[in-house]
Image: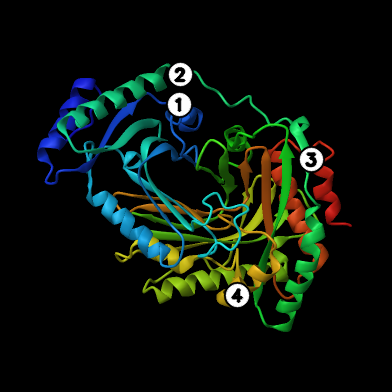
Amino acid sequence: MHSVSTFSQILTASTRCWHERDVDEFVLSLAIPIKLIDPLIQLPVIARHEQFSFLWDCMPSLCIAAAGQCQHFDLGGQQRFDLAQRFCDETFSRLIDAAPNGPNHAKPRVLLAFSFFEQIAKQDTDIGGKTTLQAVLPRWQLTSENQLAWLRLNAVVSHESDAREIAEHLWLMRDNLCNSILDHSGQIFDKDLVHSMGNNWCNSYRPSLSRGIELVNSGELKKLVLAVRQSIVLEKPFDPLFMLAKLRHHQEASCRFLWRTNKEQSFFGASPERLLSVKSGQVRSDALAGTANKNSQSIDLLRSEKNLREHALVVSSIVEQLVDFGLEPESPRAPELFKQGDLIHIHTPIFAKAKDRLPLHLLGALHPTPAVAGLPRRNALNWLRALEPFERGCYAAPIGWVDINGNADFRVAIRCGYSRGNQLDLIAGAGLVKGSSIEGEMQEVALKFAVLANQLNLGNGAYSNIFKRCSIT
């Protein structure tokens, strides 16, 4: 079938799918090109009557906005990556795409968010409660790439009248999007809306760092990545879309993401770290470890023995995992610097041919990398449970998508926060290896928190001084 752009063509395509079906009930996926619009700006339009919404913003490249749940799967427990792959396979096998010749960015996608741990110990932060996997085939999907935008509607069809109704809903939404006037570019987060901050994050972090450094210096662990949380109470609920729109200009190299389970709870961030992408049979993973302020003259990351050793552990672990999976990874001999906003990281891209390996099986092998957990992996995970007094939830876990052709993209959910009503929780961490110091790691986390504070327009207020003081207290 060819792309459709009139209501008559949409209706013809939907009824053709009904008559060509080989089951009584299936998922009809209708898609049409639409005038170039910004999915980030238009997300509130497609999510107006939906609880679930999602954003994946890599502009100026791919941008995805999605809302509603056509099919969904939640899981708490083990084998979640295998079960996620099975959900994707079964969902796509039941789906009939009425626009199979549309561009790659417009293909139907399953959206996935994992928790860091395969079991949730505490239920204080995780947006999925006790859920360790959330998989969604969205009802609405709005995408843009290379100056092209497409709108897609997924819905279960069991009668021919359903097919016509879906075509009508798609055309009506198209009109709503074309006629809406929305703009987040001028919106900012007002620092005066901060009501209070929780206990100073460094009060709980310093003793955990001390114990973590003992573990790496004794040789029990090669690396440990300890995270800490800072809670902020606001005068009114916070809308992450305003901040994510702003970050397009300040952090172009990041992937801005939003996973909103309902109108009150959101998980959002701007991740610089690709955990896994699969495109046309090619696999890519990024090793990212070692952090400094881009304006600082006090440290050269590529000459820092401690940071280079930390980075090498991440690279070797990712390579070993891919080799164990039967792949033949390749990477540059020397790392390079990667800039994200006000931060600089040491970066090494790693490539391989997929060899028909399924993306979510690969994802399960890679998560968690030493960049967000430690080495040896199992021992490090046990110590994270013991030393971190809060539940990571989706922090540092994979978030992303798989499309109907088996392409996939997953980021490590860092540089992030949770918003729940009037509460905002920010999370950051630092990697400990031999040579780490308490003050050095406190400074790194303070730097990351300061970047998050600036993104929220807290940088010039009295509250932002808390982030800066902790490293010298």
Position of 415 with respect to 234 (left or right) is left
Where is residue 445? Give x, y as percent: 74, 56
Q: Residue furthest right?
A: 473
Numbered badge on residue 222: none
> Which residue in the structure is indicated by mark 3?
196
> Which residue in the structure is indicated by mark 4?
375
Which of pointers 4 and 3 lies earlier in the amino acid sequence? 3
The mark lying in front, picked from 3 and 1, is 3
Position of 360 with respect to 460 (left or right) is left
- The alpha-carbon separation of the residues under discs 4 and 3 comes to 37 Å
Where is residue 45? Give x, y as percent: 45, 26
Q: Amino acid at mark 4?
A: Leu
Q: Are marks 1 and 2 in contact (CB under 8 Å)?
A: yes
Q: Amino acid at mark 3?
A: Ser
Secondary structure category for the residue under label 3: strand
Q: Amino acid at mark 2?
A: Ser
The mark lying in front, picked from 4 and 3, is 3
Is 258 situated above or below 273? above
* Front residue of 143 and 44: 44
> Which residue in the structure is indicated by mark 1?
45
Is 125 situated above or below 69? below
Q: Are marks 3 and 1 in contact (CB under 8 Å)?
A: no
- The residue that appears at 50% across and 32% down in the rendered structure is 40
